[in-house]
Image: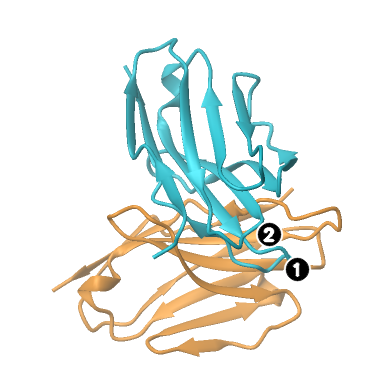
Amino acid sequence: AQKVTQAQTEISVVEKEDVTLDCVYETRDTTYYLFWYKQPPSGELVFLIRRNSFDEQNEISGRYSWNFQKSTSSFNFTITASQVVDSAVYFCALRAYSGGGADGLTFGKGTHLIIQP
Amino acid sequence: DTGVSQNPRHKITKRGQNVTFRCDPISEHNRLYWYRQTLGQGPEFLTYFQNEAQLEKSRLLSDRFSAERPKGSFSTLEIQRTEQGDSAMYLCASSLQGDSNQPQHFGDGTRLSIL
């Protein structure tokens, strides 16, 4: 069974603060893929990043950075110098490759990020 | 923009009625997924197509639910004899065939409300 836990239901910070969204996953597969999606108030899920289980390099993209640690089964997401436009629900998702096809994504419950001006 | 398109955006119906939703994926994507999202939860996987073949169904997909993708392009999701618990946002996503880390691109969803 696969599971994604996002323990932070809601985070509220003031604009320009840094904020980290936590994601812990469970899977028995040795090959798996992790994703982060953003869901703004408009509702459409927007793909942000993917990472496979063999690549533990951290990644930075502008104000966004991701820290993947297999030892703790975590794939955390940090926004530096947050902006009001970052306000959204952020989902961490897992796809484990069992060799038989492309399974659907297993999502966490999401973290509602509120950036106050 | 030729992103994933879903129709209708909103559907309100009485309990017991049948409803059908449509999804048009990104044109070059041969994989198509359906998810359901309820308030305060992440999307839950329902079913998946590769071209016209339905390759996987979640146990969430009861026998009242049926999905088709007859020509490997657009897909429909039908719910028969709707129940209150079917109220949710129904999301469609598509992706390219390839290794399993191809990202899924989502549509805006169809919000279903059962009266």
Asked if badge 1 and badge 2 are on a common chain, one would say: no
Task: Residue at the far front: name it.
Answer: B71
Question: Which quadrant would residue A95 be assigned to in this image?
Answer: bottom right
Q: Amino acid at mark 1?
A: Asp
Task: Name the amino acid, label 2.
Answer: Arg
Dot 2 corresponds to which residue?
A95
Badge number at residue A11: none
Image quadrant containing the N terminus of chain B: bottom left
Which chain does the residue under circle 2 lie in?
A
Residue nearest the observer in this picture, B18 or B61: B18
Residue B63, position as x, y percentages in the image? 65, 20
Q: Colour of chain A?
A: orange
Please tell me in which quadrant of the rendered image residue A15 appears: bottom left
Element under disc 2: strand
Q: Secondary structure at mark 1?
A: loop
Q: Position of residue B70 (x, y in %)?
A: 66, 37
State which chain disc 1 sits on: B
- The residue beneath circle 1 is B99
Crowdedness near tag 1: few (<14), some (14–19) or many (≥20) residues, C-alpha within 10 Å: few
Task: Indicate how the structure is coloured in the image.
Answer: by chain
Chain with cyan colouring: B
Q: What residue appears at the point 64 percent right and 60 percent down from the top-left corner?
A: A94
